[in-house]
Image: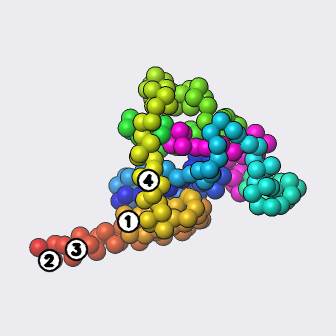
Amino acid sequence: MQVEIWSDVVCPWCYIGKRRFERALSQFDGAADVEVTWRSYQLNPAQPKGDPEHHDEYLARKMGTSIAQVHQMNERLVSLAAAEGLDYHFETYRVINTFDAHRVMHLARRHGLGSEAHERLLRAQLVEGELLEDVDTLARLIAEIGVPEDETRTVLSGTLFADDVNAEIREAAMLGCTGVPFFVFDRRFGVSGAQGSDVFAQVLAKSREAEADATTRGRAGA
C-alpha cells in the first residue's frame, strides 16, 4: 500500500496528524506492507525568503484578529499537541518560506531518509524553535539524520530539486488538496486534516480491502 502525505514542515496540524496516523499504522496488521512518502506543500509560499516573522503577529495580521485571540488559538493547539506527546512553543515559532527546506527533504528522500527528514524538521520548527530557512541550520539538522552536510549545502547553493517541489505542489492541487495535512491512500482514498487515529485505521483497512478486490477481479479476468 502506498500512502502519500502532503505536508509542510512548519505546519502545527501536520505534526499532530503525523502522530495520529502513526498510531493507527502501528496498530494495523498490514503495516509492514505500507510505504509512506512525504510530499511537498507550502502554507506560506508568498512569504519573502530571508524575512522571518513571529508567529503571533503574522497570524493576527493575516486573520484580522488580535494577539490575545491568537494566544487562545495557540493554547488549543498546544493542548492537542501535548496529547500526542509534542511540546509546541509558539513563542519561538517564526513564519518563513519553506521552499528550500522542501528541496533539502527531496535530497534526504534520495538517501532513503525522507520520513526521518520530515520528522526532524517538524520538531526543529515547532518544538525547538529553529530557523528552517537558514543554510547552516538546515545543513546541521539534516546531517543529524545521516545526509552529508556538503550535499545539503550544494543543494542550497543552487536550484536542485526545485522542479520536484513545484511538481508535488501542483499535484496536490490536481488531487483537490487545499490545505495540509492531506493523506492519499493508493490514489483511491483521500483524508484531509489531522483526523483521529480511528479514521486513519478505517481508511487503512478500506484501502487494503480495495486492493484485495482489485487483485481478485484481475485474476478472474485473466
Query: Horizontally, is 130 left or right of 204 in the view?
Result: right
Q: Earlier in the sequence, mark 1 or mark 4?
A: 4
Residue 218 percent across, percent down from the top left = 19, 73
Residues drawn in magenta: 80-102
- Magenta highlight on residue 191: no
- The amino acid pointed to by label 4 is Glu
10 Å crowding of disc 3: few (<14), some (14-19), many (20+): few
Q: Which mark is residue 187?
A: 1
Callout 1: SS: loop
Callout 3: SS: helix
* Observer-nearest of 65 and 211: 65
* Observer-nearest of 16 and 212: 16
Does residue 133 sit above or below 179 in this rendering? above
Callout 4: SS: helix
Q: Who's the residue at 35% across and 55% down the image? A: 33
Numbered disc in front, either 3 or 4 = 4
* Observer-nearest of 191 and 174: 174
Residue 200 visible in image: no
Residue 7 visible in image: yes
Q: Which of marks 1 and 2 is nearer the N terminus?
A: 1
Q: Residue 114 falls in which quadrant of the image?
A: top left
Residue placed under numbered mark 2 in the picture: 221
Cα separation between marks 3 and 1: 19 Å
Q: Which mark is residue 168?
A: 4
Q: Earlier in the sequence, mark 3 or mark 1?
A: 1
Q: Which mark is residue 216?
A: 3
Cα separation between marks 3 and 2: 9 Å
10 Å crowding of disc 1: few (<14), some (14-19), many (20+): few
